[in-house]
Image (spheres, rainbow, N blue to C red):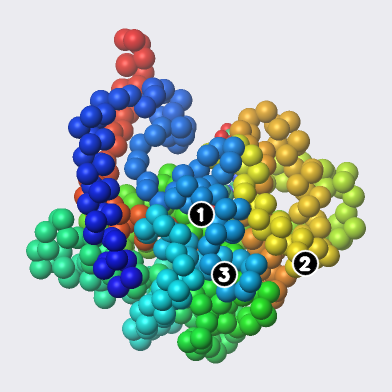
Amino acid sequence: AFFRGLTAVSRLRSRMDRLKKLKSEHGKVQLGNITVDMVLGGMRGIIGMLWETSLVDPEEGIRFRGLSIPECRKVLPTAVEGGEPLPEGLLWLLLTGKVPTKDQVDALSKELLARSTVPAHVYKVIDALPVTAHPMTQFTAGIMALQVESEFQKAYGNGLPKSKLWEPTYEDCLNLIARLPPVASYVYRRIFKDGKSIEADDSLDYAANLSHMLGFDDPRMLELMRLHVTIHADHEGGNISSHTGHLVGSALSDPYLSFASSVNGLAGPLHGLANQEALLWLKSIIQETGSDVTTDQLKDYVWKTLKSGKVVHGFGHGVLRRTDPRYLCQREFALKYLPEDPLFQLLSKLYEVVPPILTELGKVKNPWPNVDAHSGLLLNHFGLSETRYHTVLFGVSRSMGVGSQLIWDRALGLPLERPKSVTMEWLENYCKNK
Ligand code: NMX
Ligand code: MLT
């Protein structure tokens, strides 16, 4: 119970006091004007949600509790000296707002391991699906099956008061985060490795164990998995998976129900599935043109993709207006461990070729690459080449951000989320009478 005992209760009170003060002193302060374009444009630019764990700056990218990715890579504890951060450290940071010590991270690794037993019925539920079902479908089915053990659902049913609902939320979120690696690796081994699953290794940290249970023990792959799980965990609240988890949670649906919804959103090709699509696209270029592709051939390929009505996956963003720092740190990783990889070299060329073409379209707000352009080829390099599986790993990581915020949602007593919608007639009349 690393978080519950600790400073959590006093921190929680001070956060609640700040929220009360904000409401009473500044509740009527305006945060900008809502235009018809915003209503018709996917609510882009509307500030409409409190999200405690992270914030995305359009130019700088993500900050987790105020820390950028390069800062996190400097200050969060690592398994290897000078190596990648342990995602448990990021989870601690998201939950508490504080950078943990290595001992605290090790204690959290152990706690997650102790919570990681998956009930047998979960595997039976997954087994009921055809093995050909998309890995994300099998993964969500597993999460829904985990839900039957929800502490939140039980406590709510027993009449636990609102002020205490964060406690079973906390239990569920930690259990959920802990149980996702065995569920995710079961799905992988079921589909791609004849169902031969691998037991957890009690000596390993969270991400290393995930890699081990998938069947990959190369120390470089363990480092990659630590980086992967760390950088995909959270991206403020408005992205589809985080927003969905928060929205569903606001109905007091338990964390499993909420997070299963997140994962369903993540499975869309404009969101998390873009990592699958981006790698398939890279592979298709090599298949069509060979690996010695010229810049002109690449330009033609990009235009061909766009003219066929497709987007270039891995490029563009709803909030970012520069290259995603998550792309950049994966690029750094590639330069260190796999500079000769043909797919990495191809992506490096595309980094030059794609942005001017997207800019030329005249409508793309951010022509630069996002996290999904890079993640697939790194996994592919170390043998995890089954592209359709990659978004599941994004999902495992996202549980840390969605889960941490859900705990704070309940701790702060945030209300049911229910924005107002209007019809086209309503908008037309409103504008006529303006
Ligand atoms: N390729 C082609 N067209 C694009 C791209 C792109 N990469 N990015 C934006 N556009 C188009 C977009 O489809 C829209 O066209 P239209 O008006 O005809 O509908 C126009 O440019 C304006 O879009 P934006 O305002 O720049 O972007 P928006 O905020 O609507 O969407 C994304 C953001 C991420 C959905 C969009 O950039 C995209 O489709 N990118 C490719 C898919 C992708 O990589 N998604 C992963 C995002 C990160 N993640 O993990 O979730
Ligand atoms: C994410 O990590 O959720 C994506 O970059 C999408 C977003 O932030 O809109």
**Local secondary structure at mark 2:** loop
- In the picture as drawn, the residue positioned furthest to the left comes out as 159
Task: Specify the quadrant that holds the N terminus.
Answer: bottom left
Q: Residue at x 41, y 63 (%)?
A: 92
Please state which of residues 170 and 144 is positioned toward the viewer in this rendering: 170
Q: CA distance from mark 3 to mark 1?
A: 32 Å
Image location (x, y in percent) of residue 47: 39, 34
Q: Amino acid at mark 3?
A: Thr
First of labels 1, 2 by sequence position: 1
Instruction: Look at the picture and state if 201 lies above or below 208.
Output: below
Image location (x, y in percent) of residue 354: 75, 42
Q: CA distance from mark 1 to mark 2?
A: 29 Å
Instruction: Look at the picture and state if 259 lies above or below 357.
Output: below
Instruction: Look at the picture and state if 182 lies above or below 405.
Output: below
Check disc 1 and report the residue beneath it.
268
First of labels 2, 3 by sequence position: 3
Q: CA distance from mark 2 to mark 3?
A: 21 Å
Within-10-Å neighbours for mark 3: few <14, some 14–19, many 20+: many
Q: Quadrant of residue 208?
A: bottom right
> Which dot, 2 or 3, sits closer to the camera?
3
> Which dot, 3 or 1, sits closer to the camera?
3
Q: Quadrant of residue 160?
A: bottom left
**Local secondary structure at mark 3:** loop
First of labels 3, 1 by sequence position: 3
Please state which of residues 249 and 171 is positioned toward the viewer in this rendering: 171
Within-10-Å neighbours for mark 2: few <14, some 14–19, many 20+: some
Q: Residue at x 77, y 48 (%)?
A: 350
Check disc 3 and report the residue beneath it.
78
Check disc 2 and report the residue beneath it.
338
Q: Do callouts 1 and 2 mark residues in contact (Cβ within 8 Å)?
A: no
